[in-house]
Image (tube, rainbow, N blue to C red):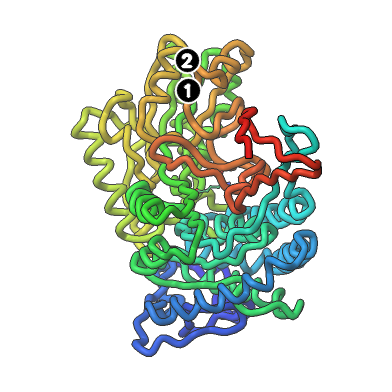
Amino acid sequence: MQQVINVEELLSTLGITSENKGTSTGIEWLANNSKENVTSYSPVDGKKIASVELCDDKLYNKTIHVAQSAFEKWHLLPAPKRGEIVRQFGNRLREFKEPLGQLVSYEMGKSLQEGYGEVQEMIDICDFAVGLSRQLHGLTMHSERPNHRMYEQWHPLGIVGIISAFNFPVAVWAWNAAIAWVCGNVCIWKPSEKTPLTAIACQKIAADVFKENNLPEGLSNLVIGDYKVGELISHDKRIPLVSATGSTRMGQKVGMAVAERFGKSILELGGNNAMIISENADLNLAIPGIVFGAVGTAGQRCTSTRRVIIHESIYNDVKSRLINAYQQIKIGNPLDATNHMGPLIDKDAVDTYLSALKAIESEGGKFIVEGAVLDFGSGCYVKPCIAEVKPNYQIVCSETFAPILYIMKYKTLDEAIAIQNNVPQGLSSAIMTKDIRESELFLSTQGSDCGIANVNIGTSGAEIGGAFGGEKETGGGRESGSDAWKTYMRRQTNTINWGKDLPLAQGIEFGV
Ligand code: UN1
């Protein structure tokens, strides 16, 4: 495959060498004596990019100690001052947008546009967090007792554990880290072992900013490892909040382990996102919305569009427009900006895609755009495909992280909403309609049961300003914007008596 970027130059710009340490407390990188490591291969061309030493128990504990002492200092800094540091981090990301976006694309396989978009999402959340650092408001309440004042305030938690997935290798970390930092917390990050290099690059960028401000080591910690490091984080009582993004299976384990020790968790797990195409839809919006939702990031977003529920009166029209649109999709090296879609993350993902295709056929689905593995590059390039299915097929009700789109028919909107809701996941959803009654019903309590419900836009590509997350097997957590910050802090209710008596609440007379 033709090389579009100079990989060596890119790696050296981001401070990555052929052999890297994978555990860091900031500027410091800790050596693993066992030298156990993971190799990052690019799904773009199958080439080895670099190797990374894995974090073990010993290094993990060292990191936690550094993080604990960093927290002791950091949480005493006024929140707007913490915001100032995050502002500088956001500015540094602006400087590194191009190389970091390229590395995201090369290591993960998403298109260059989406690689840049991911870094932009990091910059956006930094801007949001800077503003937030002056708005960590609590409420004041009226006390039922005379001469009493009641209010609530928000305090930092301590160490926030971040477990992130390969598909958004840097943005999801930044959503959590930027908010956690302004809230007065420090972070420990376990990225996916499939994308360790983008994590190393981010850690270096953050560490430099902290160092330039004479801040201690341990504000941003990186622990690259496999599921065992995830287990250490989940069971660790020294980590009051764990934010985990990934599969439902992983989230269930993390959630149970954290709950068992009375920690807090934010779980952002699987999605099975549907778009309803009403007979009142503007198909000029609907078709590109579906295609970006299904094909963007090669169908590997948790918000990817997987199911399209189409009104029977326009079913054939939508179908032929989709077939036509899929013929225009260019698949190839994602660093070549003329391609829409790059590879899947690895060969395992290709196998999962192939077994889903088999399952669709065996349940009676009919392909209107055939899937296939393409014979070039790393062997991880597949064709996006479309199958006509019944909504209740088992394969349709489960999440396959691949560009496979299911289409199905409906007669009434109530039926379409029931189909949309009748899956175990509840992340994102959308309706395409120009009819206000339809859109309001979709958004009402009788409508979508998802954490995200959109009108006339697709299921993916949420902005950072809203709370991000979903219901049911998606895990219930909320990250990013709105008041998601509240999970990163502890709420304290304060009642102050400034009078000369001690009246009891609920009118109780104690009589001493
Ligand atoms: C994910 O796939 O885990 O809404 C996150 C979106 C992106 C984030 C996706 N802003 O598609």
Q: Residue furthest left?
A: 362
Provide the secondary structure element on which disc 1 rests: helix
Q: Measured along the vertical axis of the image, is residue 172 above or below residue 456?
A: below
Quarter where residue 367 is shown: top left
What crowding class fits label 1: few (fewer than 14 Cα within 10 Å), some (14-19), or many (20 or more)?
A: some
- Please state which amino acid type lies under the numbered disc 2: Ile
The C terminus lies in which quarter of the figure? top right
Residues 32 and 169: in front is 32
* Residue 195 vertical placement versus 269 (above, below): below
Coordinates of residue 27 in the picture (x, y in percent)? 61, 82
The kind of residue tagged 1 is Val
Question: In the rendering, at what x and y percent does residue 82 appear?
Answer: 74, 64
Residue located at (52% from left, 41% from top): 469
- Labels in figure, total: 2
Residue 278 position in % (x across, y down): 52, 16
**Residue 435 appears left or right of 144:** left
Structural distance between the alpha carbons of marks 2 and 1? 6 Å
Kindly identify the residue that appears in the image at 43 percent across and 53 percent down: 262
Residue 489 position in % (x across, y down)? 61, 53
Residue identifier under label 2: 314
Query: For the point 49% across and 16% down, which residue is it?
Result: 446
Residue 210 vertical position relative to residue 355 in the rendered view, above or below: below
Query: Which quarter shows the N terminus?
Result: bottom left
Q: Which residue is mark 1?
A: 318
In the picture, measured across the screen, residue 392 lies left or right of residue 67, that is left
Q: Residue furthest bottom?
A: 33
Q: Is residue 94 visible?
A: no
Q: Are marks 2 and 1 in contact (CB under 8 Å)?
A: yes
Residue in the foreground of this view, choosing between 68 and 461: 68
Residue beneath the point at 46% across and 54% down: 263
